[in-house]
Image (cartoon, rainbow, N blue to C red):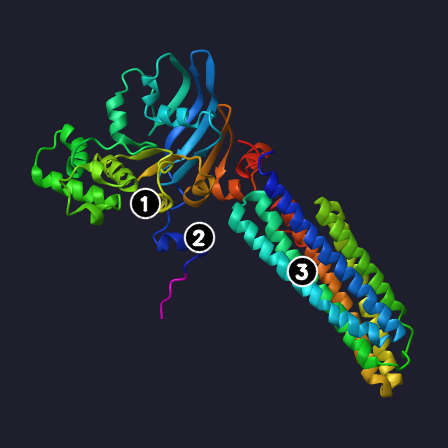
C-alpha cells in the first residue's frame, strides 16, 4: 500500500461529494427555470422539497472535512484541498438556495402570463449553468485555466442582468398593474446574477487551492 | 497643544520594537560538506541561523539532519573517519579553525538529546554539575543557579521539594526538562535539540514545546524533529534535508502552507519518507 493511500482515497471521496452537490445545484437551477417558464407549480414545490437533499449533503461535506482535518492533520496542498472543499460547498449550497428562491417566485407569479418572454432570464441561466459546470470541472481537475474562464463569463451575466432590469423597469411603467410579477422576475434575475457571483468565488477558491495564494477574479 | 505626529516608519521605534526585524545571525554555514569514510553525508550546505529563533530541521531518516546538528558543536568529531570541508561560523568565527577551543564552543552551545540522559545523581547535582566544573564553588551562587535553571526549564515547581532525590526517580518528561535545566545552568547562547520529545508522552511533549517557545526569548534554538506538526507549531524557520542536501529553507509558515519544492511538499504531506 502506498504511503497515505487511505488519505488519498478519502480526499477523492470528499471531492466526489462536492461534485455531487454541484450537480445537484445545476439540476435544481435548471428545473427552477423550467418551472418558471412553464408556470409549473408542482415542479416548483418539488424543488423546494428536494432542497433538503442539498442541505444534508452540505452538512456531510462539512462533517467529513472536519473529521479529515482531525484525523489526518493535513498540511500544504492537502489542507487547502479540504479547506477549499468547505468553502466551495458553501457557495454551491447558496446556488441551490437560489433555485429554491426562483421556485418561490414561480409560485407567486402563478398562472399569470409573463409580461414578456423570459428570453434574457433563460440566457442568464444558460451562462450561469455553463460557468458552474466549468468551475466544477476546474475543481475536479485542479485546472486554473478553466477556473479563470468560468469567472470571466460573469461579465456576460452582469450585462444581461443590467439590461433585463432596465427592460423590466420600462414594462413596470407601461403595465403598473403587473408590478408584483415584474418584481418576482427582477428577483429571479438577481438570484441568477448572484449565483454567477458565487461561481466566481468558486473559481477564486480553485486558484487558492492550486497556487496557495488569494486571487481576486472579481475585477 | 503640541502634538508630535509620529510617522509610520517611526512607530516601531516609539513602541520599542525598532530592532525586532534586525535579527543577528548566530550560525553561518558555508559550503559545508561532510563524509563518513566514502559516504558523502552532507553536500554543500549553506544555512544561516538567526538568533532568538527556533530553527527546525526536518527530513527522512538518513537525510543528514542529525549529522548537521552534531557538526554545530563539533560533536561529530567523536565519530571515527569523519572528514569535513567548508565553514561553519559561530558568531563570526569559523569553528573548524585551528586553535578554536571545542570546550569553549560547547560551553556556548548546549545540547539536549533524544533520550533524557540525566547523571545518576540528585536533581540538584545534575544542574549544579556544569557550573561546578566551570569553577563555581560558592554554595549560595550554586543554589541560585539551580533554582533559576529549573525555573527556566519549567520544572522547578515539580521538584523544589525533592532536589536531593535521585534524578532517575523522575518521569521521562521531567528527566528531559531536567536535562534542559542542566543545559541552561551553564548559560549557553544556543541550544541544540536532537529529537528531544521523541521518547516522551504527548503531554510531556507539549510541555517541552511550550518551554522551547519560552526559551527562544533568551536563546537560539535548533531542533531536529521527526514530528512535522511539532516543527510547524514551534519553529520560526524550517530546513528540509534530503539525501544530505538542503532542499528548502524558509519561514515555517511558508513550508507548511505552500512549499516551493515538490519534494518538500511530498515529504510534509506524507507522500514519502
Please tell me if label 3 and label 1 are on a single chain. Answer: no
Tell me if I can see residue A94 in this picture: no
Q: Quadrant of residue A76?
A: top right
Name the mark nearer the viewer: 1 or 2.
Answer: 1
Q: Residue A57 carries which label?
A: 3
- Image disc number at residue B18: none
Q: Is residue B41 magenta?
A: no
Q: Quadrant of the C terminus of chain A?
A: bottom right
Q: In this view, does A168 lie to the left or right of B71?
A: right
Q: What element carries label 1?
A: helix
Start-end of magenta stretch: B1-5
Q: Decide: marks 3, 1 in contact (CB < 8 A)?
A: no
| Location of residue A2 with respect to A134 vertically, above or below | above
How far is the residue under mark 3 from the one under mark 2? 51 Å
Q: Is the magenta stretch mostly helix, strand or loop?
A: loop
Query: At numbered mark 2, what does the secondary structure look like: helix, strand or loop?
Result: helix
User: Which disc, if any, is residue B9?
Assistant: 2
Subunit bearing disc 3: A
> What is the crowding at mark 1: few (fewer than 14 residues within 10 Å), some, or many (at least 20)?
some
On the picture, is B139 further left or further right than B176?
left
Judge whether A29 appears above or below B119 on screen. Answer: below
Q: Distance between the residues labelled 1 and 2?
A: 34 Å
Q: Position of residue A215 (x, y in %)?
A: 65, 51
Q: How crowded is mark 2: few (under 14 residues within 10 Å), some or many (20 or more)?
A: few
Disc 1 chain ID: B
Amino acid at each position: 500500500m502506498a504511503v497515505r493511500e487511505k488519505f488519498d482515497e478519502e480526499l477523492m471521496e470528499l471531492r466526489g461529494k462536492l461534485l455531487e452537490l454541484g450537480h445537484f445545484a445545476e439540476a435544481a437551477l435548471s428545473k427552477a427555470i423550467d418551472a418558471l417558464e412553464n408556470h409549473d407549480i408542482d415542479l416548483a414545490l418539488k424543488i423546494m422539497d428536494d432542497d433538503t437533499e442539498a442541505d444534508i449533503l452540505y452538512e456531510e461535506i462539512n462533517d467529513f472535512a472536519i473529521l479529515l482535518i482531525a484525523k489526518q492533520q493535513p498540511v500544504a496542498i492537502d489542507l487547502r484541498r479540504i479547506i477549499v472543499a468547505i468553502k466551495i460547498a458553501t457557495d454551491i449550497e447558496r446556488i441551490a438556495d437560489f433555485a429554491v428562491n426562483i421556485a418561490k417566485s414561480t409560485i407567486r407569479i402563478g398562472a399569470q402570463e409573463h409580461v414578456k418572454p423570459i428570453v434574457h432570464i433563460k440566457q442568464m441561466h444558460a451562462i450561469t449553468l455553463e460557468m458552474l459546470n466549468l468551475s466544477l470541472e476546474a475543481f475536479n481537475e485542479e485546472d486554473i485555466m478553466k477556473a479563470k474562464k468560468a469567472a470571466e463569463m460573469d461579465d456576460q451575466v452582469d450585462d444581461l442582468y443590467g439590461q433585463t432590469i432596465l427592460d423590466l423597469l420600462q414594462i413596470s411603467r407601461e403595465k403598473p398593474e403587473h408590478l408584483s410579477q415584474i418584481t418576482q422576475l427582477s428577483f429571479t434575475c438577481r438570484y441568477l446574477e448572484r449565483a454567477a457571483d458565487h461561481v466566481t468565488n468558486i473559481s477564486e477558491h480553485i486558484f487558492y487551492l492550486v497556487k496557495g495564494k488569494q486571487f481576486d477574479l472579481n475585477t | 497643544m503640541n502634538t508630535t505626529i509620529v510617522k509610520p516608519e517611526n512607530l516601531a521605534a516609539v513602541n520599542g520594537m525598532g530592532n525586532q526585524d534586525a535579527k543577528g545571525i548566530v550560525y553561518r554555514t558555508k559550503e559545508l560538506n561532510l563524509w563518513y569514510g566514502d559516504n558523502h553525508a552532507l553536500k554543500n550546505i549553506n544555512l544561516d541561523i538567526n538568533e532568538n529563533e527556533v530553527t527546525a530541521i526536518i527530513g527522512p531518516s538518513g537525510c543528514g539532519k542529525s549529522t548537521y546538528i552534531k557538526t554545530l558543536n563539533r560533536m561529530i568529531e567523536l565519530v571515527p573517519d569523519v572528514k569535513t570541508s567548508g565553514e561553519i561560523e559561530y558568531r563570526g568565527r569559523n569553528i573548524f579553525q585551528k586553535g578554536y577551543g571545542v570546550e569553549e564552543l560547547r560551553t556556548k552551545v548546549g545540547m539536549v538529546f533524544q533520550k533524557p540522559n540525566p547523571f545518576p545523581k540528585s536533581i540538584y547535582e545534575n544542574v549544579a554539575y556544569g557550573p561546578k566544573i566551570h569553577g563555581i564553588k560558592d554554595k549560595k551562587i550554586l543554589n541560585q543557579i539551580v533554582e533559576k535553571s529549573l525555573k527556566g526549564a519549567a520544572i522547578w515547581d515539580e521538584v523544589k521539594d525533592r532536589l536531593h532525590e535521585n534524578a532517575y526517580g523522575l518521569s521521562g518528561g521531567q528527566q528531559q526538562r531536567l536535562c534542559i535545566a542542566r543545559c541552561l545552568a551553564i548559560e549557553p547562547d544556543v541550544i541544540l535539540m536532537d529529537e528531544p520529545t521523541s521518547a516522551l508522552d504527548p503531554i510531556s511533549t507539549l510541555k517541552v514545546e511550550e518551554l522551547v517557545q519560552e526559551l527562544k526569548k533568551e536563546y537560539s534554538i535548533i531542533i531536529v524533529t521527526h514530528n512535522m506538526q511539532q516543527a510547524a507549531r514551534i519553529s520560526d524557520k524550517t530546513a528540509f534535508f534530503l539525501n544530505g542536501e538542503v532542499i528548502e529553507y524558509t519561514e515555517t509558515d511558508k513550508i507548511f502552507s505552500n512549499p516551493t519544492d515538490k519534494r518538500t511538499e511530498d515529504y510534509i504531506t506524507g507522500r514519502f519518507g
